[in-house]
Amino acid sequence: MSHKVTPHQLQAWLFDGQEIALFDVREHGQYGEAHLFHGVNLPYSRLELEVRRLAPNPSVRLVIYDQTGRDVSVQAAQRLQTLGYTDVHVLEGGADGWQAAGLQLFAGVHVPSKAFGERVEEVSHTPHISATELAALQAKGESLVLLDGRPFDEYRKMTIPGSICCPNGELGYRLADLVPDDTTPIVVNCAGRTRSIIGAQTLIDLGLKNPVYALENGTQGWCLADLPLEHGSTRRYAEVSAGASLAQQREAATRLAERAGVTTVDADQVVAWSRDPTRSLFLCDVRTPEEFALGSLPGAQHTPGGQLIQSTDLYIGVRGARLVLIDNDGVRAPIVASWLRQLGHQAYVLEGGLHSGLTLIPQLTSVASGLPVISAAEVADSLRDNTVALVDLRGSMAFRKAQIAGSRWSIRSHLAADLATETKPVVFVADHADMAAIAALELPDQQRADVRWLNFRAWQAAGLPVREDAGNPPNERCIDFLFFTHDRHAGNKEAARQYLAWEIGLLGQMTAQEIASFKPLASA
């Protein structure tokens, strides 16, 4: 059975130096409205699909919470125990109880990483340049290199005119191909604040002689200055870095890693760690998606370097775990590890990286038994005859954009109530069989026995009709979607101002313990 933990006991656990996995099992939209600083979102609708990746050791001290302590946390605790987790605790009173105990809740996502970026700027005095200052330099034809530190998919949506995509995790490795000399000014931008700061400070900490600046407030600051963005851009770093400067890059990366307290470990040590039943281990490949797709070490997950720093909670669910980083160049892993150490994580670099010979057993995703498949044609016939209840489990925004006439939207935590009086056989619409299978666990045995699933792509491939309805489901039902400043990149200037104010204000909401958990390097 699971145990209760009080808010103040949990607060003590978070800083006692022992491993802890703290999961918010509400849906993404609920989580983003107000959550614990160190809470990692593990939505109940995806629990079995994600938990082994986020918490690979089933004996880890694990705390879950919802809104009140009496909502989905009860079912989530039962599911976790069924999956073999042996030390499960439920936060008494949930997020409401935490706040009632005088402790702070935070809006937004990736809060520790965002707050860390603000702390880095505060400690390191990272140089910055405003949108209007940058635009003036560009208008005068001044020589400069503008690097967008975000992943390529984000870059393509919108960027500053003239920028080149080079994600932060690639900067130390690719820079020699992008900057012509050691005098040309370099500006790093993102969509807001912290990736600009981290990217610029990375170059400064590596010892670059060039003047380096973070673009203040990123693309949002650019829009607020009434400057036009560029869309669909394809400029990016070269696929293969110039080998001539690799030795210098490795030396600079190693110096930075050593300053941050990063050490290297060999494959034998990592294998020994993987057999330690008292600790959690994450093997993180920090290379590009294209490189990872060509092959990695067994047991590694893909964690693009820049994103691992700026959205650590997407990949790592255990505070105090061992993180072992790999690359194939000896540059990227040390740089990323240096930032993770400053963030407060136990990050190491694998000696030899991709060529170390390390083999770990990959984690298996634990899911329920699969549901029988129903064809698109059968569903169409059943809808025509009104002999089926069609329930769509895809994201609420995806349902709004393309829904099958006669279907309704629901989500795992609502299914039991939504289908309590349903007498017709149920068909789940989903993008993946596993999503439908775990959702079916919410239904009574008799009802679950008749459930089948339809792959939405099969419906589309059959050329069958869908419709768009921007009001279905209504906003209050869309618990999986975060409405907080969601349209800040779509021209809503007030949302952009609200987002930037939120980010700047994070440090002021944090406790002294939370701030002290960050260890940013002092300027060299």
Image: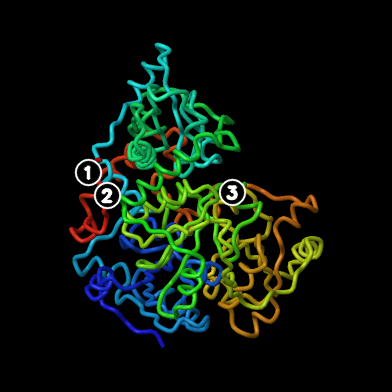
Residue located at (60% from left, 37% from top):
239
Question: Where does the image place residue 209, in percent across and percent down from the top left?
Answer: 34, 29
Camera-nearest residue between 383 and 192: 192
Question: Where does the image place residue 47, in percent across and percent down from the top left?
Answer: 51, 70
- Which element carries disc 3, helix, strand or loop? helix
Residue located at (55% from left, 39% from top):
152
- Give the mark, 3 or 1, whose residue is nearer the N terminus: 1
Question: Where does the image place residue 120, in percent across and percent down from the top left?
Answer: 28, 45
The residues bearing labels 3 and 1 have C-alpha atoms spaced at a distance of 32 Å
Q: Which mark is residue 520?
A: 2
Category of crowding for the residue at label 2, using alpha-carbon neighbours closer than 10 angstroms: few (below 14), some (14–19), many (at least 20): many
Q: Is residue 425 visible?
A: yes
Amino acid type at mark 3: Pro
Q: Is residue 92 above or below residue 321?
A: below
User: In the rendered image, which quarter is residue 201 located in?
Assistant: top left
User: In the rendered image, which quarter is residue 458 located in?
Assistant: bottom right
374 sits left or right of 290 in the view: right
Q: Which mark is residue 123?
A: 1
Q: Residue furthest bottom?
A: 1
- Give the mark, 2 or 3, whose residue is nearer the N terminus: 3
Disc 3: which residue: 289
Question: Where does the image place residue 143, in percent across and percent down from the top left?
Answer: 42, 17
Amino acid type at mark 1: Val
Category of crowding for the residue at label 1, using alpha-carbon neighbours closer than 10 angstroms: few (below 14), some (14–19), many (at least 20): some
- Which element carries disc 1, helix, strand or loop? helix
81 sits left or right of 207 in the view: right
Amino acid type at mark 2: Pro
Q: Which quadrant holds the C terminus?
A: top left
Disc 1 + disc 2, Cβ < 8 Å? yes
